[in-house]
Image: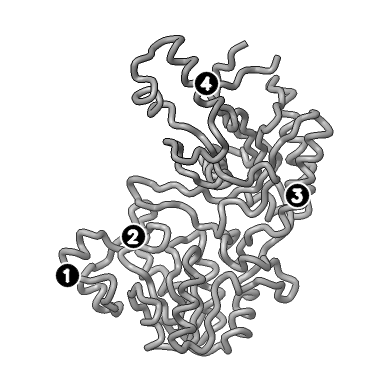
Amino acid sequence: MSRLFGTISRGVRAPIIKSGDDIVEIVTNSVLEASKEEGVEFRDRDVVAMTEAIVARAQGNYATIDDIANDVKAKFGGETLGVIFPILSRNRFSVCLKGIAKGAKKIVLMLSYPSDEVGNHLISLDKMDEKGVNPYTDVLTQEKYRELFGYEKHTFTGVDYVEYYEDLIRSMGADCEIIFANNAKAILNYTKNVLCCDIHTRARTKRLLKDAGASIVLGMDEILNAPVNGSGYNEAYGLLGSNKSTEEKIKLFPRDCQPIVDAIAENLKKATGKNVEVMVYGDGAFKDPVGKIWELADPVVSPAYTQGLVGTPHELKLKYLADNDFANLSGEELKNAIKGKISEKDEQIVGQMGTTPRRLTDLIGSLCDLTSGSGDKGTPIIWIQGYFDNYTTEYDK
C-alpha cells in the first residue's frame, strides 16, 4: 500500500506536571494512551519529544531572586556590576535581573542596539540610519538615547524595555546607569566586574573582556551553576534557558536529561517493539517576519536526545531533480527516475544539490516547538512520524 502522508507532527495531551512527578512514566503513558485512543500505531524511528519545561518542573528545578542575589554577591563582591547584552524579555530576563540587582549596589546595564541578540528591537534600523548613529562604534548614554530615539515600545509586548529594566533594578535597591553599545569592552570604562548575559555569543564576549583587562568576568551560565542554599541549578547553563515562574522565582533549564530520554526510549521499545527516538526540546530556531525575533533564547534547542537523532539530514532536492536531471520526463517515468536517484544517493550527498545540513535536533526541535506552542494547548509532548521517510518509502504491511 502506498504511503500518502509524509511527516506528521502530533501534540499529545498530558497531565499538569508538578515537582516530584515521574516524568519518564508520564511521557511513556501519555503517548501509549494516545496511540490506543486515537488508533495510531508506532513505527520504527518515530520521534517522541517533551518540552524542557515539564522536565524542569518535574525535577523541581526552581530558584528565587534571593538565590540569584546571594550567588551574584558571592562571586562579584556586591559593589558595582556591569550587566551586558541581556535579551529584552519579561519572561526570560526580568526575574533574573531582579536577583542580579539585589546582589549589587549599582548596576551599569549595557544594552546592544538596534536589537538584542535574538532580534528584539529597541529601535529600527531606519531610525538609526536617519540619526546618523554608527552601532559599531557609538556608545550612547541613556540621555543621548532618549534625545535621539525617544520612548520606543516593543512591537509585540508594548513595553519600553529601557524604562522597564531601570525600574526593576531600582526596585531592588540598587543604583542604575544604562548605556547602549555593541563593543563589549565599552563597559570597562564604568566597571571591571562584568556579568555577560548574552546566550550564543557569550564565550567570545568573555574572552574579549578578559583580554582587555577586566577583573571578574562571568556569564549567566556561571550563576546558579551549583545550588545555593538548596536552590535549583544547572551545572552546564546556570541561569541560561530559565523562565519566569512567579514574580519572585524562576524555573531553570532542566539538568540530567540523558537518562530520562534513554529510559523513555527503553519503555516504548518494551511496550511497542519499535525503536523510537526521544528528545527534550526548548526554543526552536526560527525567525518571525514581523517582530524580527529569531526565538532561540535557550542555550541549545535540545539538551538531550537518543543516539538516532545525532547528525544532519542527507536529502536531495526533488524540485531540482525534476527541473534539471529529469526535465524531459513526466508522469510515472519521472516518478520512477526520481525514486531511483534517491535510492542511489550516498549518505553525504557530496557535490549534489541537497538540503542545508542543519542538525536533526535543531530541525526537529523547531517542529516540536511550533507544534506545542507556548500557550494553552496542553500538549507538552510531541509525537512525530515519518520524519525520516523519503519519496521512496512505503508502508511495510
Query: By what rule are the colours in the image chosen?
Result: one colour
Who comes first in sequence, dot 2 or dot 3? Answer: 2
Q: For numbered disc 4, what is the local secondary structure?
A: helix
Q: Which one is earlier in the sequence, the residue at label 2 or at label 4?
A: 2
Assign a secondary structure to mark 2. loop
Please report whichever mark, 3 or 4, sits nearer to the chain's N-terminal start.
3
How far apart marks 2 and 3 lie (CA) works out to 37 Å
- The three-letter code of the residue at mark 1 reads Gly
Neighbours of disc 2 within 10 Å: few (<14), some (14-19), many (20+): many
Residue placed under numbered mark 1 in the picture: 132
Q: Of the residues tagged 3 and 4, which is closer to the observer?
A: 4
What's under tag 3, amino acid-wise? Answer: Ile
| SS for dot 1 | loop
Residue 170 appears in view: no
Percent coordinates x, y for residue 219 in the rendering: 54, 74
Residue labelled with disc 4: 340
CB within 8 Å, label 2 to label 3: no
- Mark 1 or mark 4, which has the lower sequence index? 1
Marks 2/1: CA–CA distance: 17 Å
Instruction: Reply above or below: 354 against 94.
Output: above
Which marked residue is nearer to the observer: mark 1 or mark 4? 4
In this rendering, position of residue 82 left or right of residue 303: left
Q: What element carries label 3?
A: helix
Give residue 63's quadrant in the image: bottom right
Q: Quadrant of residue 318?
A: top left
Q: Residue 260 carries which label?
A: 3
> Which mark, residue 121?
2
Give whichever of 175, 306 is nearer the camera. 306
Give the x, y percent position of residue 177.
Answer: 38, 82
Instruction: Point out the image quarter for the N terminus.
Output: top right
Q: In which quarter of the image is the C terminus?
A: top right
The answer to whether 133 is drawn above or below residue 397 in the figure is: below
